[in-house]
Amino acid sequence: MKDTQNGEVLLRVENLKKHFTPHSGLVQSFGKARNPIKAVDGITFDIIKGEIFALIGESGSGKTTTGKLVMKLIEPTSGKLVFDGEDATTLDKPQLVAYRRKVQMIFQDPYASMNPRFKIRDVLAEPLVIHKIPGDMKRHDELIIKALEEVKITPPGEFMGRYPHMLSGGQRQRIATARTLILNPKMLVADEPVSMIDLSTRAEILHMMKEVQRKLGLSYLYITHDLSTARYFADKIAVMYLGRIVEMGPADMIIDQPLHPYTKALIDAVPEPLTGKVDIVKELPISGEIPSPANIPVGCRFHTRCPYKTQECIDLPEPELEDIGGGHMHACRRYKEI
């Protein structure tokens, strides 16, 4: 499967949706039926082999649910996943095991994602055992040492006998990354991988992850709310709002030439690098919180918070993504006026 502009597509997401139905007990308690929660409401994007694709947005935008759908931790309501040319939308158990060898996940909390009773050697040996990777203990130790060296945990032998609580947050995230690499995957889903790490070590971890990606030719789905790290780390950025992608394109283009008001607002909210402060006198202030995905506004779903909205933003159907060239896509009717 080819992308005419960028090369071979590793993952294709087509009109993917995930709607959660409220529990029947809640319906009985409130005395009336509740709307489905549209966490992901029809998104389409491609991840090219060897590419870092960032999915950004506020809490409640649907980006983490998208990551879980790609990881096959939850099943989609509708839509399609195509991985490496094969349909991965519905998989039986053996197919799912094979898929998860190719697609691994780095979780947000590197401590909670490890068994605190396991030594680091056991943490890294666990996927080898689960996936029945052939070899004796000596061969497995060789794979573990190689993975630790990839993430710059040296000397590996000194860390294999330690427990997770004996490591710093940055070291634990390196171990979590090594655990994904040990199965030789094709793609990693990284869900806020540096949000729980000290600010001083975030750049080091991202640099390490990028070095590993380049060396091994990996693809990343990088999920974050932080535009500053997305610009440094990603090749492409997709901006999610209330379950939909509202802008997408090359990272530098999205940051330097944002077209959607929501993207502009996210960029304005990034603290100044020298002072660490957010300038409160911004060209584009937005107020209020993201609406509930159970009650999505009619028309453009951003209109309830957009300072540029007009009546047509409410009355007309929701705008679809429009490609203005160079792979830069947006979903705003008024982008030229803005």
Image (tube, rainbow, N blue to C red):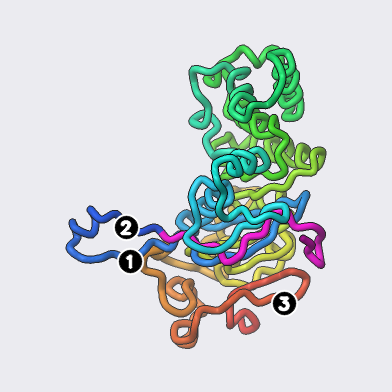
How far across and down, in percent of the image, does residue 51 sit? Answer: 75, 52
Q: Main secondary structure of the magenta part?
A: strand
User: Real-space Cα distance between discs 2 and 1?
Assistant: 7 Å
Mark 1 surroundings: few (<14), some (14-19) or many (≥20) residues within 10 A? some
How far across and down, in percent of the image, does residue 111 sit? Answer: 52, 28
How far across and down, in percent of the image, does residue 320 sit? Answer: 58, 77
Region in magenta:
1-19
* Residue type (three-letter) at the residue carrying disc 1: Asn
Mark identifier at residue 22: 2
Determine the secondary structure under disc 1. Answer: loop
* Residue type (three-letter) at the residue carrying disc 3: Ile
Residue 270 belongs to the span the image colors magenta: no
**Mark with earlier residue (2, 3):** 2
Q: Is residue 241 visible?
A: no
The residue that label 3 is drawn on is: 324
> From the viewer's perspective, is the residue at label 2 or at label 3 nearer?
2
Residue drawn where x is 51% and y is 45% of the image: 73
Mark identifier at residue 35: 1
* Vertical comparison of 1 with 304: above or below: above
Residue 5 belongs to the span the image colors magenta: yes
Give the camera-side residue of 243 and 91: 91
Residue drawn where x is 57% and y is 16% of the image: 119
